[in-house]
Amino acid sequence: MGPPGESYPDRPLTSVIMENFAVRFADLLENVSQRVRAMTVDRLSKVITLIGIGLGAALLGFVALVFILVALFRLLSIPLGVTAAYAVFGGLFLLAGVLVWRMRRSKPITGEANG
């Protein structure tokens, strides 16, 4: 069998077309499935991978923050004592809470009921 543009004078046209039909149809289905996969599964797998990496990084960051806070508390409790270290940490968290409270939205969103 020759290239697609080659003529076959001794064979009818329908036999030449139908001879390649199964192969061409299989190639068409494979191309369609590859395009659908590229538009859906491949993109989602990248997103899921990034979400997993982000969650892992957030967890490690949170654990590191806890360890740093415990270390700072213990270092602070050496010269001041445990009660004063609790007072200092409580004051810092109180100031952080006041700062966050002041940064909140002061005007209600339009359409919300006041009350």
Image (tube, rainbow, N blue to C red):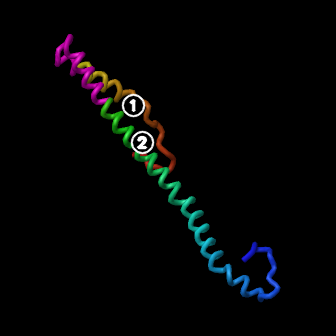
* Residue type highlighted by circle 2: Gly
Q: Quadrant of residue 91?
A: top left
Asked if the magenta segment contains residue 27, the reply would be: no
- What's the residue at 68%, 82% (across, down)? 19
The amino acid marked with disc number 1 is: Val
Question: In the picture, which quadrant includes the N terminus?
Answer: bottom right
| Residue 35, x across and y down, in percent | 59, 63
Residue placed at 77% from the left, 86% from the top? Answer: 13
Question: Residue 81 magenta-drawn?
Answer: yes
Q: Kindly state the secondary structure of the residue where label 2 is placed.
A: helix
| Mark 2 vs 1, N-terminal side | 2
Mark 1 crowdedness (10 Å alpha carbons): few <14, some 14-19, many ≥20? few
Q: Which residues are magenta?
A: 65-86
Residue closer to the observer: 62 or 19: 19
Q: Which SS type dominates the magenta stretch?
A: helix
Residue 107 point in image, percent of width and height:
48, 39
**Residue 82, disc:** none
For residue 113, side relative to residue 96 (left or right):
right
Q: Is residue 65 above or below residue 14?
A: above
Q: Nearer the viewer, mark 2 or mark 1?
A: 2
Residue in view at x 36 percent, y 33 percent: 61
The disc placed on residue 54 is: 2
Q: Determine whether the residue tagged by mark 1 lies in a helix, strand or loop.
A: helix
Q: CA distance from mark 2 to mark 1?
A: 25 Å
Determine whether, in the image, residue 39 is placed left or right of residue 90.
Answer: right
Residue corresponding to mark 1: 100
**x and y percent of residue 62 in the render?**
33, 34
